[in-house]
Amino acid sequence: MEGQRKVVVTGMGMITPIGRDVASSWQALVDGRSGVGPIRRFDASGFPVTFAAEVDALPDEDQADLKIRLASAAVKEAMEQCGPLPYEPERIGVCLGSEAARPSLPVVARRYRTGELPRFSELVRNAAHMPTEIVAGLVGAKGLQSTVSTACTSSSQAVGEGFLRIRRGEMDAMVVGGVDVLVGPLMITGFSLLGALSTRNEDPQAASRPFDQDRDGFVLGEGAGFLVLEDEQRALERGAQILVELSGFGCSSNAWRITDSPPDGRGAAQAMSLALESAGLTPGDVGYVNAHGTSTPMNDPSETRGLHRVFGEEGGPWVSSTKSMMGHLVAACGAVEAVVAALAIREGVLPPTINLENPDPMCQLRHVAKEARPLAVDHAITNAFGFGGSNGSLVLSRYV
Amino acid sequence: MKNALRVRVAEVGVVCALGSDFQEVRRRLRAGESAIVPCDIPGAPVDWTAARCEVDDRPLLTRRRDRKLFSRAATLLLCAASKALVGWEGDREELGLFVGVRREPPDTGEAEEAILASASNKVLSTALLAEEGRHRYPPLQPLKTLPNMALAHVAIQLGIRGESGVVAGGSAAGVMAVREGIAAVAEGRSPAALVGAADSWLDRGGLRDWARLGLAERPPGEAAVVFRIEPEDGRRGLGVMERGGAGTGRDERARSHWGQLGDCGVADALVAAVSAGGTLVGVDAGKGWAEATWTP
């Protein structure tokens, strides 16, 4: 938009169930490889769901919590790519999408048995904003730090908040992203009881099938994704390599139900429209949508309806859901999928929705089905919608 | 830091132990009244004191299922938000909603039966959880404990569909949420917004954390404060609110009201401002801070 500061991406990092960094995760996406498999972290054989999309174990040199290790690894990759940020620490902020960590099942059980109270250190360590503070320490940021916690929309909104802070001149650089680790007995139990998870235990790699008529729920995943955002002028002055422009952000509330999306797709459409308006673009400018596409019976037709409201029922941008390969990274999905959308623009390749054998008639879209599609696009949208009805959309654009 | 983002405060909704009418609470705070009484909440040590709200949520929570889903902080927030909406005649489709919360509501014992059923000879078994315990796990538990549920419930109950956000974590979260809302209104993304925070230490999980955090020297409290903010347009209201700075490196929290209302956590800075306005300063344990200034 004229007169406003442009926000550019100069560093990206991610660790996902299909790769330990950006390059390996991207290659797996382009190849259509699934990261879903039988749960390795605990014996899940008696549970209604026995599979998930887990990350490969990381070295545990300092006994740190897995969530912290994932966030640290992804931030380190993003910071290595962008290089040293020569700004005053007070002009560098951190915004993270995350939620509070939970004590492990054995700890919970011991506490119930003995009446033992949690330790002070555990309460502090498990606080929602703790990963944010650790990331701020890692990157030497002393500007505003905040933690957004809107379930599956968390990191999309965190990226959006970072975008707004740079655009209005509040910060010169923002390290933004998200992390989540939920694969455990209690979460599998809880999400199963909600009926949200796929139960395709006999064929885990085919379980996440967004927009397919045989979909039956999402696959729980885990991971972290981070982006370094900078004011364009400051980035140019320091000679940074600009990867893409982050050009728009929009968010909304469904005010519908806690777990379901409204069938008319209104909230999703509102978030996408606001993001396009924020970017100064029209729907016809968008070439690719990385959909929220969870593979649940309710989300996918609702998101489709939202896409139709914005882009029309015919034609429209190409659409895929990379959750078909990575599973649902919950609080981290928005940031990870923003990295994916940025790579799609840079590499000229749209990653596919694998397992999309029979598109649901209620999900008629221009699908990138089963195989990646080489295609140059200038603008991409990435969607994230959460339990509770929070919606977030980001627009990424080719930097020219 | 740019401080040019200003809005008009059109209404304030307050729910705290000194009442739930903004002007009345302001008067009582200024008069130095205290709502701190011996704590009779099950699980609290006998010598503790606390400041607990009396709220009538029956007009707002008419369904039994809602009562099960709502945490205490979510209930307080809904009551305060509904008061802040009084007089709003505009569309709620684009009304913004920005909320600060401390963390997700703790499990206050609902999962106990499931955990106990998953242990044999006092040793937990994942297999027993899979076979037996999971059938006793409350299905609404994951929903109840998500940090954004307070915002979700308010949006659903009051039909608010505009830009929204939840800032979670330390005690600065409430002021951070206020700052985000001010920006959304002042920059024209929202025609108006409800901004505020809610917190309660007064349940089994909260009191447990209170004790372990070593805070027992001051009384735990609970409160929700929600401002309805609108663009500055020359109309009279309850004053002007301006977005202040934010950063890291402070460690002094608002505490002037602790002798009257106890520690209200994430809502502290907002509660302190109810008395006379001024600068709302939110400070996290990790020294992250945020400011907004309310000039009544």
Image (tube, rainbow, N blue to C red):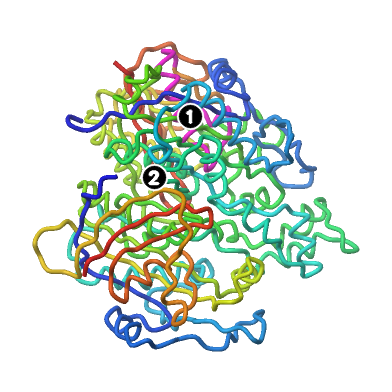
Note whether A259 is above or below A30 in the view shown: below
Query: Where's residue A367, x and y in %?
Result: 42, 23
Check residue A321 in the rendering and tell me which mark sits there, or answer none.
1
Q: Residue at x 25, y 54 (%)?
A: B93
Mark 1 belongs to chain: A
* B228 relative to A44 in the view: left or right: left
Dot 1 falls on a residue whose secondary structure is loop
Helix, strand or loop at mark 2: strand
- The answer to whether residue A362 is left or right of residue A42 is left
Q: Eyeballing the image, is A384 above or below A352?
A: below
Residue that mark 2 sits on: A391
Query: Residue farthest to the left?
Result: B234
Say which residue appears at 32% left-offset and 19% top-offset.
Answer: A236
> Which residue lies at the image location 45% right of the left edge and 38% below the top edge?
A300
Q: Residues within 10 Å of mark 1 (few under 14, many from 20)?
A: many
- Residue A125 in the image: state x and y as whole percent: 63, 52
**Where are the magenta residues, as a range?**
A322-349
Q: Quadrant of the N terminus of chain B?
A: top left
Name the spot of residue B73 as percent of width and height, x first. 47, 68
Q: Is residue A50 above or below residue B99?
A: above
